[in-house]
Amino acid sequence: SGQAFEVFTLFPEAVAGFLRGGLIGKALTRELVSVHCTDYREFATDRYRTVDDAPYGGGPGMVMKIEPVVAALEHVTRLRGPMHRILLTPAGPRFDQRVAERLAGVPRIGLLCGRYEGIDDRVREHFVDECLSLGDFVLNGGEVAALAIIEAVARLREGVLGNPDSAARDSFSLGDMSQEACSREQGAWLEHPHFTRPPEFRGLGVPDVLLGGDHADVAHWRREQAWRRTWALRPDLRPQRWLAAGAPLYLVA
Ligand code: SAM
């Protein structure tokens, strides 16, 4: 059955609205994936539905209170069952394609979005299984991070993409070219560039090899482009073993 995401947020409508479109929307309709959004505010107990309070120790900003967050988690767990709980925070390990691949195997995922200065840290310590960050920058809330994770994870699930091969060929994946050119541990790279009709636009052509119709030539060109791009643009991805394994000369130059 499908993979379930539970998003905990103060903006359930915004999250749900975004997910209705595109391939994830289709996957939701086909029940390959499900997403439930839970509003922390419904679990606030005072008459003003307060979810934040001033930080202990003073200073600017507000902190999300622990009680509504834990009440929301426990309610959803009772209702739909236990889940792998992930806190979105800039202090977490960086989310990437390897993490997406791991999470694609997890049947139920809870994503806790913070707002303000973040959630009372006792939640991180005692009520979640892991923390994830989208990158070294600060968002106003965890919602965009949760959406990014849902997209990246769900598109790896069987049936979500129209063509099952395309995920294996995408940038950062370990599929496809790794089988031909390198072994798995040699890492991921950026995908080759793509072109479509027209063959000429304002004098700008497309590489001849793509118009030639020779599949072996095209495959060779694409592999070379992927290597070149990765080498030039993402030195951090350059697998150490490329050279040891005898990288083509155009890469060494
Ligand atoms: N005061 C926090 C700090 O400096 O680390 C930032 C809080 S941020 C304004 C509010 C919420 O946005 C966080 O609780 C988190 O859920 C989310 N958030 C912000 N940046 C993020 C990132 N890079 N990755 C994941 N979530 C992020």
Image (spheres, grey):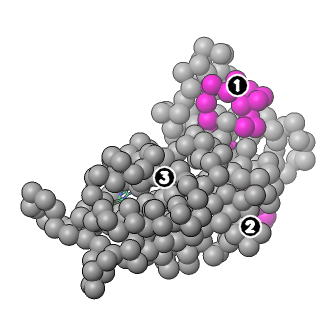
Instruction: Give the spatial CA distance, label 3 vs label 2.
Output: 22 Å
Q: Which residues are drawn in magenta?
A: 175-201
Q: Is residue 253 visible in the rendered structure shown here?
A: no
Tag 1 residue: 182
Is 199 magenta? The answer is yes
| Residue at numbered disc 3 | 85
The total of numbered circles placed on residues is 3
**Foreground: 250 or 95?**
95
Check contact, mark 3 vs mark 1: CB within 8 A: no
The residue depicted at 74 percent of the width and 40 percent of the height is 222
Q: What residue type is labelled 2?
A: Glu
Q: What is the spatial separation of the Cα atoms under label 2 and label 1, in whole angstroms? A: 36 Å
Judged from the image, the quadrant occupied by ligand 1 is: bottom left
Residue 154 in the image: x percent, y percent? 65, 57
Q: Please report whichever mark, 3 or 2, sits nearer to the chain's N-terminal start.
A: 2
Location of the N terminus by quadrant is bottom right
Q: Is mark 1 within 8 Å of ligand 1?
A: no
Q: Seen from this angle, which residue lies furthest left?
A: 58
Instruction: Inspect the image, locate mark 1, and give the three-letter code of the amino acid beneath it.
Output: Cys
**Considering depth in this image, is 104 or 133 the residue closer to the camera?**
104
Instruction: List the residue tagged with mark 2.
Output: 31
Q: Which secondary structure, mark 3?
A: strand
Q: Measuring 63% from the left and 60% from the top, which residue is drawn there?
A: 4
Q: Are marks 3 and 2 in contact (CB under 8 Å)?
A: no
- Would residue 122 appear left or right of 195 to someone viewing this image? left
For the C terminus, give its image quadrant: top right
Q: Disc 1 on helix, strand or loop? A: loop
Instruction: Name the N-terminal-most of marks 3 and 1.
Output: 3
